[in-house]
Amino acid sequence: MSWDMILNSGFLIALVASGIRLAVPVLLAVLGEIFAERSGVLNLGLEGIMAIGAFAGFAVTFTLENAWLGLVAGLLAGGLFGLIMAFFSVTLRTNQVITSLSLVILGQGASAFLYRQIFGVSSRPPRVEGLTELTIPGLSQIPVLGPILFKHNVVVYLAVILVVLSWAALFRTTWGLKVRAVGEYPSAADTSGINVARIRYTCVILGAALTGLGGSVLSVAQMHMFLENMIAGRGWIAIALVIFADWRPSLALAGAVLFGVADALQFRLQALGFAAVPYEFLLMLPYVLTILVLVSRSGREAGPAALGEPYVKEMG
Amino acid sequence: MKRANQHPVWRRALFKNLVIPALAVLLSLALGVVLILVVRVNPLDAYRALVKGAVGSPRALVQAALRTTPLLLISLGLTLAFRCKAWNIGAEGQFFMGALAASWLGLALDGWPAWLLLPAMVVVAWLAGAAWAVIPGFLKAKRGTNEIVTSLLTNYVAIFFVSYLVRAPMKDPEYYLPQSAPLGPAATLPFIPGTRLHIGLLLALLCVPLVYLILWKMPLGYRLRVVGTNPEAARYAGISVPSHIVIAMVLSGGLAGVAGMVEVSGVHHRLMTGISPGFGYTAIVVALLGQLNPVGVLLAAYFFASLVIGADSMQRVVGLPVALTEVIQALVVVFVLASDYLTRHWEK
């Protein structure tokens, strides 16, 4: 095992290509959380929401043998968790940190419970087909860039489209302006006639739905199975990446790909039997990288001013 | 009844610390019925098996007490941290670092007398847990980095580190499994005379009044609480918010580390990755259900410990997965939160 097995174009192209693929579940969660946080709600429950999304996606795909319906199920399951979060944090004005931490436990617990009850425990977990690769004719033949960018399954392209849509929604529509106003200065937004609660409900539910979709992409389109703890901290990494991305969808893409490549690197080095570093240290890589990224951003971070604060309407 | 009316503060405290958590638990168990019905099991059979498994035999009581010990230690630490609004959710990693330091010392100083070795192991475990918690605490204090995310991410790093150590450098060559060599007799916690309970339980119980004293009878506790409830006021009073966040992280990390020592030295007698079924995460719920009050935390720790012990036998008897307890945990938190809202409204 030597370094030239790693430092060659074949390895690097495959690395970046799978990095992009692995970025998708995290990217969707980051986008979702950007909506929630831009509206002023700190939802730390992504880890649990991705878990329930992953389970719902897998269960529906397995039962109905249709991966697309599985992804829709992940979206809906996430949205349901978003509704719970919105009800507590917006209507009951509970502490957002504690509420969303309970969603982590709820999502992990409920998905593990339902999976074991329905599919049982086995050394060979049931698998699903997933989605086929969509190789874009012509473009995928370009050397280097072709295999990196244009040979993926459909969700990769969908995720990129969602980045553009999220950016447009937040920065090019009146609704996006309202969302940002609610996150920055809810009482002023309220005075100008914006329904703060409605905006927050929409953003939290939409955000959690995207997060649930991210979870179902992981189980349905990438791993082709459901495993307890399969989210493995991706939800938390997504929360860190929101800060890294400065609450902007475009930078979210960059952050998620960075994480995806780190993840792909540890997978591929392990697969090659790279022995210079014990594999446990490779497994640490994405987490350590995320901490470093978070540290490098902090001090300069400027999130929405009203983030995490329940809004109490002034009674005249 | 009349007396209670004359003591509204006392009555409110009782209501907040006892009635609400109890109601939250009952409601969660009731909602658990729905989940059990969904998977077509008779909820009556399920809960009967749960209760019988939790309190139905001396063995079950011992197991629940053993399981209470690490939960209690960790959640008492989290009580200190959360009172200061230092959201340490890295207790799982701090627990592992404490377990690692204690087993390393226990193996390295094999042959030392127990009265010297065991306290030394507690001290290094405390230091290791505290040091691991200092990372997110310091980053929060110095750079404003979100401690929730960093402390959580450090869990993964700690667990992978321990799994490397027990697979390679610290591995017991006699066994196939990734685990360290067994601790010598002097490095294992003795039983409380006449029981099958190790003295770690006493240590944890001792921490209940200790944490109470720190929080309500010592200037440090007062400062931690002021920083938690009103950082602005703390600043005016000359209390350094960043340094108290670090102190809160250190205290909670240290206790999580000690919990790790107690588990390896009292229960498993060697270091391995299977020493925690998520104690560091359950302890968060325990601290919250206990309303960040040491006595409440003691009751909550015992409750969740018995719940898991009971769920183990429920799984054997009616085949319901133990993961049900996690759902119940989450529901308990949700109901405690909802009741906070209700009490706010009653008081108005």
Image: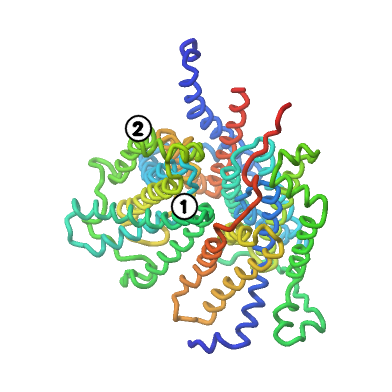
Give the residue drawn at x 53%, y 82%: A272
Q: CA distance from mark 2 to mark 1?
A: 25 Å
Residue of label 2: B217
Q: Residue at x 81, y 57 (%)?
A: A172
Q: Where is residue A2 shown, x and y percent of the image?
A: 48, 88
Please indicate whether residue B226 sits to the left or right of residue A241 in the image. left
| Left or right of A200 in this view: A101 | left
- Disc 2 secondary structure class: helix
Q: Are marks 2 and 1 on the same chain?
A: yes
Q: Secondary structure at mark 1?
A: helix
Q: Residue furthest top?
A: B2
For this rendering, which residue is in front, A266 or A107? A266
As shown in the figure, which amino acid type bears the numbered disc 2?
Lys
- Give coordinates of residue B62: x percent, y percent: 35, 42
Question: Is B108 located above or below residue A113 in the figure?
Answer: below
Q: Position of residue B327 (x, y in %)?
A: 57, 45
Q: Chain of mark 1?
A: B
Q: Quadrant of the C terminus of chain B?
A: top right
Label 1 sits on residue: B141
Looking at the rendered structure, the kind of residue marked 1 is Ala
Give the number of the disc on residue B208. none
Q: Residues within 10 Å of mark 1 (few under 14, many from 20)?
A: some
Q: Which mark sits nearer the N-terminus, 2 or 1? A: 1
Q: Which residue is rendered at x = 31% and y = 51% of the image?
A: B266
| Relative to A226, residue B323 above or below | above
